[in-house]
Amino acid sequence: MTNGTSENALMARSRTNFLKIWIGTGTSQLGSQISLLAIPTLAILVYHATPFEASVVGALEVVPFTLFSLLAGPLVDRLPRRAVLVVCDVARFAAIATLAGTYLAGLHHMWIIYAVAFVVGTFTVFFDITFMSFIPHVVAKEHLLTANSRLGATNSVAQTAGPSVGGLLIEFLGPARTLVVDAVSYLVSAAAVVLVRVKEPRRNNSTLRIGVLFAEIREGLVYVRRSPVLARVALTNAMCDFGQAIIQSVYLVFIYNSLHLPPGQVGFVLAVTGVSFAVGAILLPRVTRWLGFGRTMAFSVLLGMGIELLTPLAMLGFAVVVLVGINIITGATNAFYDINQLTYRQKRTPDELQGRVHATMRMTFQGPTPFGYLLGGALATFVGVAATIFVGAVVSTIGATALLTGAVLRLRSIDEVDPDPDPGKPLSSATTKEDL
């Protein structure tokens, strides 16, 4: 009876902690989605940024993933993860509040947007890597897929409501005042994390010398390279995210200047992706059982990237219908792929390597994206925004084919995956069927 009571108490505490994280993250995601529309709108419509200048904003938001991801891994594996999350939220609040405040004070300079984009991107690197490593302490590993699905669905709700609310707020308040909503959302997220009560494992408190730092970074790189599935996922995401950066660098320029849609309709078009992602997250367990874990990852990313080849057709007419149709498919397939590959990574990786493996994957995913943003801006100058979007879709589709391999397609269930007990040795002793 005592054991049963203790187990029930632990489960109740786990649910409470997850609920706090869930609410805090959802609020922050909503604010961030509003900013994703408000900051480029501020640059394009108020500061009259050129396509290249708009692409620089996007590049500066993601270049920290290239610069700091590998460094963040060893630090996250050494520091209290809850404290890191709080510091990152407070820092991002300060950055967004600064952008809104300087605009309202009459300081209208693109370099301020550039600086804020870089600062927010830097702390997002540390937050995201820490958050992915923190969740396995909040919920049991057998519940990770469910937890990630709920977090993914919440993110999709934010993607749905954020652009719609953001578009309306921008029309009534202007983009600068709209940023205040995002700033406050980071404080809500920080407060939620502070209230979480979990016991984290004892960290490695040894002095982090340069030699040790590079040795620990190498452990994360080697771990990913030795895993047939993780290595393929890294390659796929590197190419897909590079292609998506080319697209996103000019996407809002395409919508505003080529299709001439108002902010309200732009918010609606972007919101559809979130609705579809939410539906995809709900359907994911059924789809995975029917199609198989690995096949769901491989086929969903291929379909989601390939459908974007049709985006330039919006210029021929019925622009909103075309973009909405594409975003419905990309939203659902993104849910299938993103949630499954994250759950696989969390289950595959031992706790002491979580930070470094997530950092390695983030670096390979988003490391090339700044160059994609800059290339997109340069291409748009010479060939136009529609052709640039098509080039980005081609790159992403080619990248998606990397998952069409036996190690991925044979993976039937996430239950087949366990942590590698000794990542420093050859993976012949690993307890996952991916290597069969």
Image (cartoon, rainbow, N blue to C red):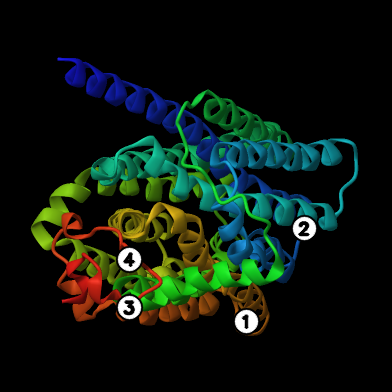
Where's residue 187, x and y in %? 63, 29
Residue 426 numbered mark, or none: 3
Q: Name the residue under label 2.
A: 114
Where's residue 162, x and y in %? 51, 39
Residue lying farthest right? Answer: 106
The CA distance from mark 3 to mark 2 is: 44 Å
- Whether residue 331 appears in this view of the structure is no
Under tag 1, what secondary structure? Answer: helix
How many residues crowd mark 1 within 10 Å: few (<14), some (14–19), many (20+)? many
Q: Mark 1 points at which residue?
A: 379
The CA distance from mark 2 to mark 1 is: 21 Å
At 39% from the left edge and 79% from the top edge, which residue is drawn? 399
Looking at the rendered structure, the kind of residue marked 4 is: Gly
Under tag 4, what secondary structure? Answer: helix
Sequence-earlier tag: 1 or 4: 4
Q: Is residue 7 above or below residue 324?
A: above
Looking at the rendered structure, the kind of residue marked 3 is: Pro
Residue lying farthest bottom? Answer: 382
Under tag 2, what secondary structure? Answer: helix
Q: Quadrant of residue 236?
A: bottom left
Q: In this view, does 305 lie above or below 171?
A: below
- Whether residue 342 appears in this view of the structure is yes
Q: Name the residue under label 4.
A: 304
The residue nearer to you, when weighing 73 against 378, is 73
